[in-house]
Image (cartoon, rainbow, N blue to C red):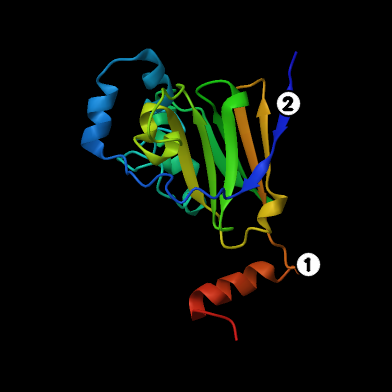
Amino acid sequence: MASRKQLDVHRGDQSPQKWRISLGEDVFKSFLSQGCPTVHKVFDEGSFFSPLLFGKFFDPSDAFPLWEFESDILLSSLRSSGQSTVDWFQSDKDYVLKADLPGSGNNVQVFVDKGKVVEISGQWRQQKESKIQDWRSGHWWEYGFVRRLELPEDAADWRKIEAYVDNDVHLEIRIPKDLLDGNPQGNEIVAAKDSEGGVN
């Protein structure tokens, strides 16, 4: 029986040290070569949390401007080989992201950082006793996964973002657009702002 659970979307937590260690390409290749099946499930090329998702290496802890690209173009090679379970698109009202999670959806958290970045993260392995209390502050890929995405410029108030998990596997995030109180000229104003460098 299908089940859908709504996730809380948190304001960026007070952990200034998180994601301070970048995942480099050489380190990632060495880590992936260990051959752990769970590691491959989390980080293989078609995974939403893989540094190789977009065709070339990109640290998923760095914010990526996802909605500036068409998913059909960015994921074309993965889709042709049936490797990707990720999709994103936009409608007149919102931006939508859909992706399969590498583990139980109960382990996923969604944060919005400073109203500009949406962050999806979770743990695939429990952290052993360590001087570092927060797994995100060290070599985070050894314990968890993350994908940080820049919010579009016309996104509405972050408190209106909705996140769901279907059947503990399928993640869906909806980011409403700021329709300027229903003003049909909203898109034109945004376009003018972009072209002129600001609206007086």
Q: Residue at x 63, y 72 (%)?
A: 188
Residue 188 to residue 198: above or below:
above
Residue sitting at x 68%, y 48%? 161
Point out the residue furthest to the bottom here: 200
Image quarter where the C terminus lies is bottom right
Q: In the rendered structure, find residue 181 and report the number of the disc placed on it.
A: 1
Label 1: how many residues lie within 10 Å, few (<14), some (14-19) or many (20+)? few
Query: Measured from the top left, where is residue 47 in percent x and y?
Result: 44, 28
Residue type of the residue flagged with mark 1: Asp
In front here: 86 or 133?
A: 133
Q: Quadrant of residue 107?
A: top right
Q: Is residue 195 visible?
A: yes
| Alpha carbons under labels 1 and 2: distance apart | 30 Å
Q: Residue visible at 26% across and 40% down?
A: 24
**Rendered-image quadrant of the N terminus:** top right
Specify the quadrant of the image occupied by residue 163.
top right
Which residue lies under the disc numbered 2? 4
Q: Position of residue 87 (x, y in %)?
A: 54, 36
> What amino acid is labelled 2 in the image?
Arg
Q: Secondary structure at mark 1?
A: loop
The answer to whether residue 93 of the structure is visible from this angle is no
- Residue 148 vs residue 4: left or right? left
As drawn, 14 above or below 184:
above
For this view, does 48 lie left or right of residue 153?
left
Instruction: Please determine whether, in this image, residue 155 is positioned above or below residue 105.
Output: below
Can you tell which mark lies on residue 120?
none
